[in-house]
Image: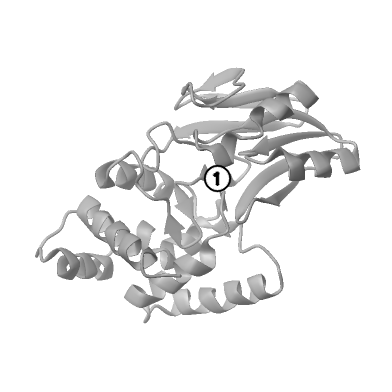
Amino acid sequence: MLTLLPLPAFDDNYIWLWHDEHHAVAIDPGDPAPLVAYLDARGLGLDAVLVTHHHRDHTGGNRALRDRYDCAIHAPDNPRIPAVTHIVRHGDCIRFERLGLHFDVLATPGHTLDHVSYIGHGCLFCGDTLFGCGCGRLFEGDAATMAASLDALLALPDDTRVCCAHEYTLSNLAFALTIDGGNPALIARAQRDQAARAAQRPTLPSTLALEKTTNPFLRFHDEDMRRFAARYLHSAHPAPHEVFGALRAAKDAWDATQP
C-alpha cells in the first residue's frame, strides 16, 4: 500500500512524499529537517529524491539527504543543483522497482529554463510551473515558453492529481476573483479552500479538471480570458501566449499591491 502526502516546509513549501511503510521517494525537499523527522519517526528509508528545478527551496536538502540515506538524487541538468546522481531529461521514465513507482519526465520550462515535471500514478508533480489557481513567475522563460509548458499539462487526463510545491492557493484565488469573479466554479472553490486552510488542511492536491475550470493561467485559450487580455493589452486579437502573458503581468502587478 503506497501513501502520498505533502510535508510542510519553510513558510509555504510542500515536500511530496511517497512511501510504502518501508521505503520512500521525496520530491523537492528544500528543507531536509521535516523530511528526516518524518522518515526517522517511522523507520523509513529514503530511496530517492526527485528535483523539479534549481531553486534553493527545492534543492537545499539534497546533500544532507544523500549523506544520511545514501539515496539517489534525480534532477535536470544544471550545475546549480547539488549532489545529483542521475540527470533527467524530457521523455525519460524513472522506475523505483522496490516501491512499484514509475514517473515520466516532462520538460516544463518557463519559471526556470531547467524546470521539469514528473508524472506517474495519476499524479503530476509540477514544482513551480503550476499552482493551485495559479502558476509560477517567469524568472527565466518568457510567456510563450510557459504557455507551451502549460499546454503540455492541459493535455493530461482531467483526473490527474496536481501536486504543486507551494501552498499559494488562497492568494491565487483572491487574484482570480478580481478578473473572473462571475465564475461559479471559482467561487465554490474559494469557499472550499478557505475552509480547508481555516482547518489547517492543505488545499492540495487539486485535480487538473478543477484547475481547468478555475485557474485563469490554464484558461488562456478561453474567450473570457481573451477578452480580459484584449482590454489589458489594448489589442483586439491577442494570441493565446499573449493572453497568458497579460494574465501573468496582471498577477505580478496585483502581487506588488499586497502587504
Q: Where is residue 194 in the image (x, y as percent from the top left)?
A: 59, 75
**Picture quadrant of residue 203:** bottom right
Q: Position of residue 90 (x, y in %)?
A: 44, 27
Rate crowding at label 1 as few (under 14), some (14 to 19) or many (20 or more) other CA atoms within 10 Å: many
Q: Is mark 1 on a helix, strand or loop?
A: strand
| Residue that protrudes farthest toward the top in the picture | 85
In the picture shown, does residue 94 fall above or below 164? above
Q: Which amino acid does label 1 sit on?
A: Leu
**Residue 58 or residue 94, whichever sits in front:** 58
Q: Is residue 94 left or right of residue 42?
A: left
Residue at 50% of width from left, 64% of height from top?
A: 210
Residue at 47% of width from left, 79% of height from top?
A: 187
Q: Position of residue 238 (x, y in %)?
A: 15, 58
In the picture shown, does residue 251 fall above or below 185? above
Residue at 73% of width from left, 31% of height from top?
A: 100
Q: Can residue 221 be seen in this view?
A: no
**Residue 118 or residue 36, whichever sits in front:** 36
In which quadrant will I find the N terminus? top right
Q: In the rendered image, which residue does mark 1 sit on?
A: 124
**Picture quadrant of residue 121:** top right
In the picture shown, does residue 27 fall above or below 164? above
